[in-house]
Image: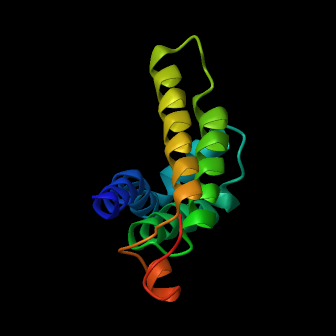
């Protein structure tokens, strides 16, 4: 059961990043403008897309899971603080809390890794210690 729970957790954590990364490609100019409105340089957008889309896919397939999960946890915290820090706005506060909750999930995944049903497991001979 642990194998399937780990895979399900990876899929559930990653899906928002895969969808969001793809959406940023489709709405590139609008996303750049939104980033600029929050004081972030639009030139960072390709890196954001790479982290969201590439990182999300890497989590699903279990490739470099611990490092990718750690990177996404840090991204969730940073982007939550930059884009959702408005405690007077209930919607933004909820979005901030969601980012922090996702960061917590990614930190647990960074701890556990992807011990089976993953590229990491295949690269280590079929099993990985958690």
Figure check: 50 above or below 70: below
Most foreground residue, 107 or 23: 107
Looking at the image, residue 98 sits to the left or right of residue 82; the answer is left
Most foreground residue, 123 or 22: 123
Residue 53: x and y in percent read: 47, 66
Figure check: 124 above or below 3: below
Residue 78: x and y in percent read: 67, 42
Outermost residue on the top side: it is 88
Figure check: 128 above or below 13: below
Residue 52: x and y in percent read: 51, 60
Looking at the image, residue 88 sits to the left or right of residue 58; the answer is right
Residue depicted at x 49% and y 59%: 28
Most foreground residue, 6 or 23: 6
Looking at the image, residue 66 sits to the left or right of residue 28; the answer is right
Looking at the image, residue 69 sits to the left or right of residue 8; the answer is right
Q: What is the image's colouring?
A: rainbow
Residue depicted at x 51% and y 56%: 29
Count numbered badges in the picture: 0
Residue depicted at x 55% and y 40%: 104
Residue 49: x and y in percent read: 53, 63
Residue depicted at x 69% and y 61%: 43
In which quarter of the view is residue 37 placed? top right
Look at the image and tell me in which quarter the N terminus lies.
bottom left
Figure check: 25 above or below 95: below
């Amino acid at each position: 059961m642990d194998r399937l729970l780990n895979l399900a957790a990876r899929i559930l954590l990653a899906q928002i990043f895969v969808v969001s990364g793809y959406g940023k490609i489709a709405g590139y100019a609008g996303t750049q403008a939104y980033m600029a409105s929050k004081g972030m340089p639009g030139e960072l957008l390709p890196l954001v897309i790479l982290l969201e889309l590439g990182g999300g896919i890497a989590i699903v397939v279990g490739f470099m899971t611990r490092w990718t999960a750690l990177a996404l946890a840090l991204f969730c915290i940073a982007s939550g603080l930059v884009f959702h820090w408005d405690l007077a706005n209930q919607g933004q506060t909820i979005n901030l809390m969601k980012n922090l909750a996702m960061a917590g999930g990614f930190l647990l995944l960074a701890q556990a890794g992807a011990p089976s049903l993953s590229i990491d497991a295949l690269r280590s001979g079929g099993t990985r210690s958690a």
